[in-house]
Amino acid sequence: LGGYHNLSHHGKDEVKLGELEEIEIAQIELLGELLRDLQEVEETDGSLLDNTMVLYGCHMGDANIHNNINLPVIFAGGGFRHGQHLAFNRHNNTPLCNVFVSMLQKMGIEADRFGSSKGTLTGLM
């Protein structure tokens, strides 16, 4: 699945967008397999997925123009509240590092900042 960087600069070319879509579908299918595999492993206090944090995303909101606002992120496991779509104000950009602070705190690490964070990510707990 590597070697497709040029497709991210698609310029709205339908052929490139189609190829990029195929790659992204394959990536999400692999992520789904990983999450199912983690869910199937039982531990004493839940599944392996319950005890694992999986963060999947991209460092670009729109790679075509190198925009890092409104990043697409999927977060699974780790005992957080899931099954929801969290959307944040794109004009008052919530730092991705807020997710990392939430993750650290969930692991019992006393942290109120990480990188450019402004706190935890609203809606995860």
Image (cartoon, helix red, strand yellow):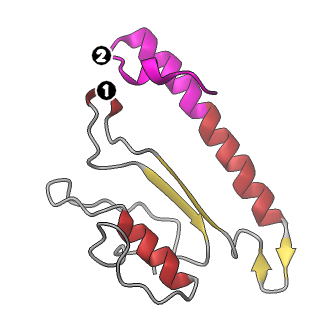
Q: Is residue 116 above or below residue 90?
A: below
**Residue 102 occupies quadrant:** bottom left
Residue nearest the viewer, comparing 83 with 45:
45
Q: Which residue is mark 1?
A: 64
| Residue drawn at point x = 74 percent, y = 48 percent | 33
- The type of residue carrying mark 1 is Asn
Q: Which mark is residue 34?
A: none
Is there a contact, CB below 8 Å, between mark 2 and mark 1?
Answer: yes
Q: Is residue 70 left or right of residue 15?
A: left
| Crowd around label 2: few <14 · some 14–19 · many ≥20 (10 Å) | few
Q: Position of residue 75 (x, y in %)?
A: 52, 61
Evaluate whether residue 37 shows in this view.
yes
Q: Which residue is mark 2?
A: 11
> Magenta stretch containing residue 121, yes or no?
no
- The type of residue carrying mark 2 is Gly
| Crowd around label 1: few <14 · some 14–19 · many ≥20 (10 Å) | some
| Residue drawn at point x = 36 percent, y = 17 percent | 10
Evaluate whether residue 124 shows in this view.
no
Helix or strand or loop: what does disc 2 sit on?
loop
Helix or strand or loop: what does disc 1 sit on?
helix
Residue interval drawn in magenta: 1-25
Q: Is residue 67 left or right of residue 108?
A: left
> Magenta stretch containing residue 12, yes or no?
yes
